[in-house]
Amino acid sequence: MKTKDWFTDWFNTSYYHVLYKDRNDEEAQLFMKNITMFLSLPKTTHILDLPCGKGRHSVFLNSLGYKVTGADLAENSIKNAKKFENNSLKFKVHDMRQPIKNQYDAIFNLFTSFGYFEEDKEDILILQNIKNGLKKEGIFVFDFLNADFVKATIVAKETKTVDAITFYITREIKNGFILKNITFFADEKNHSYTERVKYLNIDKMKAYFKKAGFKITNIFGDYNLTNFDAENSNRLILVAK
């Protein structure tokens, strides 16, 4: 069951969506409203939401009047998202490691959907793909965890019951990765998954962006677009061109 890429397995299971079903849509929508207003994105903007999961950000951006394409590696998520398609909202299966075929006015990488790979060059390649997928004056919005804040506030053990499934969660920082181990019993079987996200603090991210040819224009620390503070911000949000 274990493949090299944990996310290929885990994001494609129904259990992933059970565990995270109570994700805060209000927060996500607030962020999308705030960032599109801050950037003064005209309604003609074509946004690529990469990776888009089941499309919650894409659907909301589309409701604000934008043309949106959502792309994700998880086929089950895309199948689910396709139910929301219309003339100005499309979904497709795409791996961030592959070049982006079209060019977009804006690309959004949201909700800590980065830093999955062992090698720095793999993460930088994704940023380069994004850079190449943007039009000349295109804008990149990157929403990641604040690694230093995670380190200071990490909850080592947690138990969560959702839809009659009890998830046992442990977290640790090890070998340059933030690890979240998730074990549970469901459908007559024991399951175990580990989410791995690279410990990328602001200095490391700035170095990555520079290597990919991006120029950072703004750094925010939360969805209200407050200035970033390495000790207290719960997010690291970068806007770049």
Image (cartoon, rainbow, N blue to C red):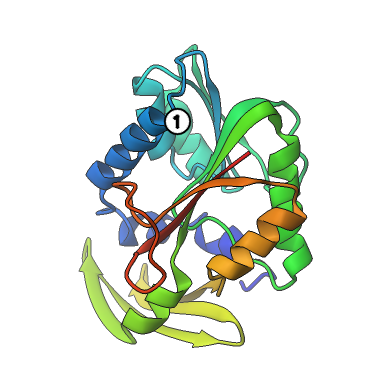
Q: In this rendering, would 12 be left or right of 150?
A: right
Specify few, some or many for label 1: CA neighbours under 10 Å numbering under 14, 14-19, or 20 or more.
few
Q: Residue at x 27, y 39 (%)?
A: 30
Q: Quadrant of residue 72?
A: top right
On screen, residue 51 above or below 36: below
Amino acid of disc 1: Leu
SS for tag 1?
Answer: loop
On screen, residue 12 above or below 78: below
Q: Residue at x 60, y 63 (%)?
A: 205
Q: In this rendering, would 3 be left or right of 91?
A: right
Q: How many callouts does the rendering have?
A: 1
The reply to whether residue 182 is visible in this rendering is no
| Of residues 10 and 174, the one drawn nearer to the viewer in this rendering | 174
Q: In this rendering, would 179 be left or right of 30?
A: right
| Of residues 121 and 137, the one drawn nearer to the viewer in this rendering | 137
Q: Residue at x 67, y 54 (%)?
A: 209
Residue where numbered disc 1 is placed:
39
Q: Indicate the position of residue 75 as horizontal and vertical percent values.
A: 57, 44
Q: Indicate the position of residue 131 as horizontal and vertical percent values.
A: 71, 40
Q: Quadrant of residue 71?
A: top right
The reply to whether residue 180 is visible in this rendering is yes
Q: Indicate the position of residue 184 as horizontal and vertical percent values.
A: 36, 76
User: From the image, which quarter does the N terminus lie in?
Assistant: bottom right
User: From the image, which quarter does the C terminus lie in?
Assistant: top right
| Of residues 131 and 65, the one drawn nearer to the viewer in this rendering | 131
Q: Indicate the position of residue 211 as horizontal and vertical percent values.
A: 76, 57
